[in-house]
Image (cartoon, helix red, strand yellow):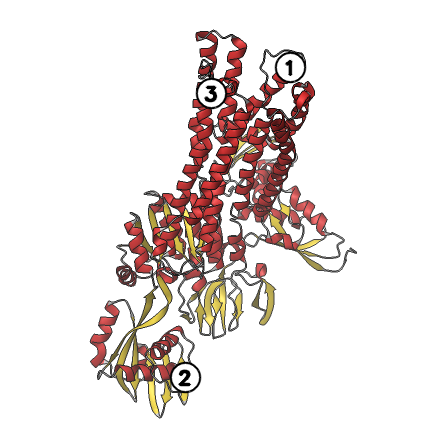
């Protein structure tokens, strides 16, 4: 690439910045570099914009400058889309895959060789020392390459004062391997003092099978970084700013506080500010969850990333970069995701009890045979080793991942997507379910509730209002039109029509002047409303919006409009409460509106008037009293979803919400929520059963390994002193039991599924 | 040798600590710099014959971490 020596601009995606000071550090380092004329580093978008004048600097030089102060530059712009977390996850999958197949490549032939010898298929070679050494050659790479992670994980766990699954695997397989090396050496030297059997294939198989479980697990693990990227994409890349009286297009990072920003109809608002000139309606649904556009005029605040609908306006930027509301949401999501404590896996909890018990039993075996039975030091040692080897359950690694795989598959068929296995495990522990109001409990769009004609002429009133509203695209107009059509009323094309911003519509329908809209529209047109005032008061008491209709200068009736409850919301709340969960509704709406909706849905507990950034805080408070699941759909819910123990996003909502959540419901119906919890319980039950089967055969064989059957001379020798074939049989049986039990989950009956017809499709 | 411990309220992450230690440490006459992320303090030892506190203070301000006290 020939360097361009004229003035040019380079944009670098920076990694590793954790605070605004970091951005300042990067900026300073670049500014000091010769050839750089201008630098601006945006912390929220993680971009450095560098202007170069008469410089031969290349991207690599700038990368070096950035890395010298402790940060990184992503290589290709495309890579910027993938955060470090996703890359780390990919690397882990690749690593685990490589290790697993290495394990298969070595343990497979080893198993065949060992079985062939146990079933006396090797003839004269059976007792040849080189067979043992061939097994050693096959087992060793598995032990120390494939199994290395268990040593690392086990060591960490022991240092933290507990014994997890890794300890068990590392201990069991190492004992088998070390003992086998000793036996092989002794046999080569012609001595059977250390025993006759080697357990190389037991060690290798345990490691490989558990590695399979690990591989399944890392592949199922969810990503968390996407949410932030989605949020960043809500910001436009450029803004139209008035500089020296001329409107110019500048990149978002160059918008300064105090700039006059110009927004066109349909455009996205770049940064936060205060409107100075013009009027418009703005769709703020991505921040507030409220689908109804908001009217804005001079003096009103506008928020970056919201969408301008109809008017053009100019506003003064008050907050840019990391200070904008969107940047705050991004920060909240980041913080919440980072703070989520990992759950202790059930398998690890079992192991933490099992490991000390097994070690105790092994020691007891040794002491009893050595001191009480007086069988001699070496035979006692051999029995102790046998106990440790047989105790390591190789199906343990399969118990959780196989059940989770089947469980998530079952969920996916029902439209419930668990993004991580932890979400599936954690959902069972939920005590409190928090439901967002708009778009979650309710449809999030207005619906006509009641029609009240002054003369009882309801149908006529609705038909007239619908005709007048016919050409308007306002959500309220659409609701009126839908209500008229649902009742089979005839709607007339108006001969003239005008939308009055923030008020309603005026139209002429078949020669009649019709006004539909707010009380203000009526008073501004000199219409007497007195006769219908009591009706308006009644509607407002129900927290609904009154919509006035006037004909030829006289008020003829009122419609009430409100956000309607979704189908199934009430039933879902009932099911959740029946399951013993506390149900709370969380909303930014006024208390009265919220109470009205909550009462209709059967919810007693309401947290209303919550500011957009207060939702995560509210969740945090509830978390002090129990495990919290949050159900929401908007971008404003993203921090709360990330903060909650189990974030559940409604699939019809914002992509960001889904990315921040642990579970996504593909159907907007709340009845999926109790179903998701039930599926979680069923899966966890399966995991528990799996753990039982994983340990069962091994536990049964511990007494055999300990030599308790030794004195029964009529038993086959295989049972009197542990033979490696028994270890192999235990592994085979427990693995088959575990996988079979997991598959059963595919057909398990879920109670809430029955009441939720059509969900299967 | 002169020692001084100051507070830099702007310290918010490990990068800030590294930046202060690197930049101040490069200053001629400064013998040792130790920044603490949690306490938000910076401990500096310097040779008063070579440099002056004013110079250090200026540098810290320039790199975005002005000292207090």
Q: Are marks 3 and 2 on the same chain?
A: yes
Residue receiving disc 2: A498
Q: Secondary structure at mark 1?
A: helix
Relative height, residue A583 to residue A513 (above, below): above
Residue receiving disc 3: A704
- Relative to the observer, which residue lies in front, A139 or A309? A139
Task: State the CA–CA distance, disc 3 to disc 2.
Answer: 91 Å
The answer to whether residue A41 of the structure is visible from this angle is: no
- Which chain does tag 2 point to? A
A288 left or right of A543 in image: right
Residue reaching furthest to the right: A2
Q: Residue at x 66, y 28 (%)?
A: A138
Question: Which quarter of the rendering shows the N terminus of chain A?
Answer: bottom right
The x, y position of residue A555, in whole percent, is: 26, 83
Task: State the CA–CA distance, disc 1 to disc 3.
Answer: 24 Å
Which label's residue is closer to the chain start, 1 or 3?
A: 1
The x, y position of residue A413, in whole percent, is: 46, 55
Relative height, residue A75 to residue A350 (above, below): below
Task: State the CA–CA distance, disc 2 to disc 1.
Answer: 100 Å
Residue receiving disc 1: A187
Mark whose residue sits in front, 3 or 2: 3
The answer to whether residue A426 of the structure is visible from this angle is: yes
Question: Which quarter of the rendering shows the C terminus of chain A?
Answer: bottom left
Q: Are marks 2 and 1 on the same chain?
A: yes
Q: Secondary structure at mark 2?
A: strand
Residue reaching furthest to the front: A714
- Which chain does tag 3 point to? A
Which label's residue is closer to the chain start, 2 or 1?
A: 1
Q: Secondary structure at mark 3?
A: helix
A117 left or right of A387 in image: right
The x, y position of residue A293, in whole percent, is: 41, 69
- Relative to the observer, which residue lies in front, A213 or A503? A213
């Amino acid at each position: 690439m020939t360097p361009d020596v004229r003035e040019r601009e380079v944009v670098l995606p920076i990694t590793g910045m954790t605070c605004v000071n970091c951005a300042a550090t990067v900026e300073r380092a670049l500014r000091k570099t010769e050839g750089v004329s201008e630098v601006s580093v945006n912390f929220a978008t993680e971009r450095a914009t560098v202007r170069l004048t008469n410089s031969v600097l290349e991207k690599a030089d700038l990368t070096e400058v950035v890395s010298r102060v402790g940060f990184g530059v992503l290589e290709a712009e495309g890579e910027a889309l993938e955060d470090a977390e996703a890359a780390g996850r990919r690397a882990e999958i690749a690593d685990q895959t490589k290790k697993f197949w290495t394990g298969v490549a070595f343990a497979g032939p080893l198993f065949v060789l060992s079985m062939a010898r146990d079933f006396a298929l090797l003839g004269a070679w059976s007792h040849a020392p080189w067979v043992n050494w061939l097994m050693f050659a096959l087992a060793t790479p598995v032990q120390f390459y494939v199994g290395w992670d268990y040593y690392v994980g086990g060591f960490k766990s022991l240092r933290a004062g507990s014994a997890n699954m890794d300890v068990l695997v590392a201990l069991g397989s190492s004992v088998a391997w070390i003992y086998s090396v000793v036996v092989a050496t002794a046999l080569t030297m012609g001595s059977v003092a250390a025993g006759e059997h080697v357990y190389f294939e037991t060690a290798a198989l345990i490691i490989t099978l558990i590695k399979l479980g690990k591989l399944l697990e890392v592949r199922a693990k969810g990503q968390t970084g996407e949410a932030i990227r989605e949020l960043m994409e809500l910001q436009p890349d450029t803004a139209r700013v008035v500089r020296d009286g001329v409107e110019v297009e500048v990149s978002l990072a160059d918008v300064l506080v105090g700039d006059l920003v110009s927004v066109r109809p349909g455009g996205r608002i770049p940064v936060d500010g205060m409107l100075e000139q013009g009027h418009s309606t703005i769709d703020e649904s991505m921040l507030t969850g409220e689908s109804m556009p908001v009217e804005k005029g001079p003096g009103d605040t506008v928020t970056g990333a919201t969408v301008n609908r109809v008017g053009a306006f100019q506003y003064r930027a008050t907050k840019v970069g990391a200070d904008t509301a969107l940047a705050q949401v991004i920060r909240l999501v980041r913080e919440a995701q980072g703070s989520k404590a990992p759950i202790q896996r059930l398998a690890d909890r079992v192991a933490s009890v099992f490991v000390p018990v097994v070690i105790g039993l092994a020691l007891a075996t040794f002491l009893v045979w050595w001191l009480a039975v007086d069988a001699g030091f070496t035979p006692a040692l051999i029995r102790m080793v046998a106990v440790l080897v047989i105790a390591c359950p190789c199906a343990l690694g399969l118990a959780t991942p196989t059940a989770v795989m089947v469980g998530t598959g079952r969920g996916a068929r029902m439209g419930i997507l668990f993004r991580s296995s932890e979400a599936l495990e954690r959902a069972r522990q939920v005590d409190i379910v928090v439901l967002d109001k708009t778009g979650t409990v309710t449809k999030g769009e207005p619906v006509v509730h009641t029609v009240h004609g002054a003369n009882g002429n309801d149908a006529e009133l609705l038909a007239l209002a619908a005709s007048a509203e016919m050409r308007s695209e306002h959500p309220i107009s659409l609701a009126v039109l839908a209500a008229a059509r649902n009742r089979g009323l005839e709607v007339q094309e108006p001969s003239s029509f005008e939308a009055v911003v923030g008020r309603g519509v005026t139209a002429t329908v078949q020669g009649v002047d019709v006004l539909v809209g707010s009380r203000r529209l009526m008073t501004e047109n000199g219409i007497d409303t007195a006769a219908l005032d009591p009706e308006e008061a009644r509607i407002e008491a129900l927290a609904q919006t009154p919509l006035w209709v006037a004909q030829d200068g006289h008020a003829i009736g009122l419609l009430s409009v409100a956000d309607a409850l979704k189908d199934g919301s009430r039933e879902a709340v009932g099911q959740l409460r029946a399951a013993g969960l506390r149900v709370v509704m969380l909303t930014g709406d006024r208390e009265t509106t919220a109470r009205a909706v909550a009462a209709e849905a059967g919810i007693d507990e309401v947290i209303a008037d919550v500011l957009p950034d207060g939702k995560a805080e509210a969740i945090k408070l509830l978390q002090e009293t129990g495990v919290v699941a949050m159900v929401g759909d908007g971008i404003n819910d993203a921090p709360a979803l990330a903060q909650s123990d189990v974030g559940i996003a409604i699939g019809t909502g914002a992509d960001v919400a889904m990315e921040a959540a642990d579970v996504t419901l593909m159907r907007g119906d709340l009845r999926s929520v109790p179903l998701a919890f039930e599926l979680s319980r069923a899966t966890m039950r399966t995991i528990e059963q799996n753990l039982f089967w994983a340990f069962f055969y091994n536990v049964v064989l511990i007494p055999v390994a300990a030599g308790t059957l030794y004195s029964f001379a009529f038993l086959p020798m295989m049972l009197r002193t542990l033979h490696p074939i028994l270890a192999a049989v235990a592994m085979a049986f427990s693995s088959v039991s575990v996988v079979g039990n997991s598959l059963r989950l595919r057909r398990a009956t879920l109670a809430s599924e029955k009441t939720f017809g059509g969900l299967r499709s | 040798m002169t020692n001084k411990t100051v507070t830099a309220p702007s310290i918010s992450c490990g990068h800030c600590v590294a930046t202060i230690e690197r930049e101040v440490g490069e200053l001629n006459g400064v013998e040792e710099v130790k920044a603490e992320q949690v306490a938000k303090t910076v401990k500096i030892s310097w040779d008063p014959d070579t440099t002056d506190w004013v110079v250090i203070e200026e540098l810290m301000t320039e790199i975005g971490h002005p000292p207090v006290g």
